[in-house]
Image: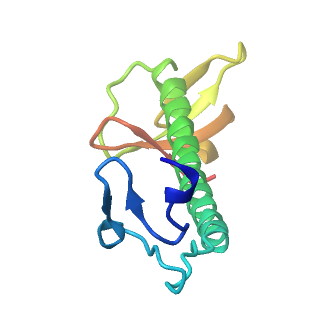
Amino acid sequence: MQEEDKKPDNVVFDEETQKYDAALKPYATGVGAPVITTPDTVTWKNVNIDKVNKQVKAKYEELKAEYDALMEKFEYNNLIYSAKFNFEPIVGEIYHLYRDKKQQSFLSIIAPNQCRFDYVQSFRLNADKMWEVIGD
């Protein structure tokens, strides 16, 4: 095409098909058409990022608290199951964990106020065979 055959900028002409195709464009092509502007999404993103971060942090803290409680339960159960005892504990009954002179743990049915053993903690055996802490 020569320089004088070129169309003005506001005319949409497809040189490949040699046709005017302004009506086929998905956007405005005329000089009098409304301006195409992109929405400001920065504020929306920042507000929602803050909300998501708070939600994720809350869920993390909730899961961490559950994990800590589960690990505490695991440690108590590990401590009791590795302690010495010469009886079969009954589900629902309360037992007391003590330490002997060699600092080895043993489980007993004798309450702390009925003996002078080195008291550690009291526990109840639940139906799942998990030991639950009783009192402080």
Does residue 96 appear anywhere in the picture? Answer: no
Front in this rendered view, residue 65 or 84: 65
45 w.r.t. 108: above or below: below
Left or right side of 1 for 115: right
Q: Residue at x 48, y 47 (%)?
A: 1
Residue beneath the point at 30% across and 41% down = 91
- Judging depth in this view, the residue of 38 and 83 nearest the camera is 38
Please state the total of marks drawn on the protein image: 0
Horizontally, residue 22 falls left or right of residue 63, namely left
The spot of residue 87 in percent (x, y) is 36, 23
Give how far across and how far down residue 83 sits, in percent. Answer: 52, 20
Residue 86: give x, y in percent of width and height: 40, 18
Residue 5 vs residue 47: left or right?
left
Vertical relation: 52 (above or below) 43: above
98 and 24: which is toward the camera: 24
Visible in this render: residue 36? yes
**Residue at the image position 55 percent from the left and 23 percent from the top:** 106
Side of 116 relative to 59 (left or right): right
Q: Position of residue 75 (x, y in %)?
A: 55, 30
Q: How is the image coloured?
A: rainbow
Q: Residue at x 42, y 66 (%)?
A: 12
Front in this rendered view, residue 101 or 57: 57
Q: Residue furthest top?
A: 102
Is 87 located above or below residue 16 in the figure? above
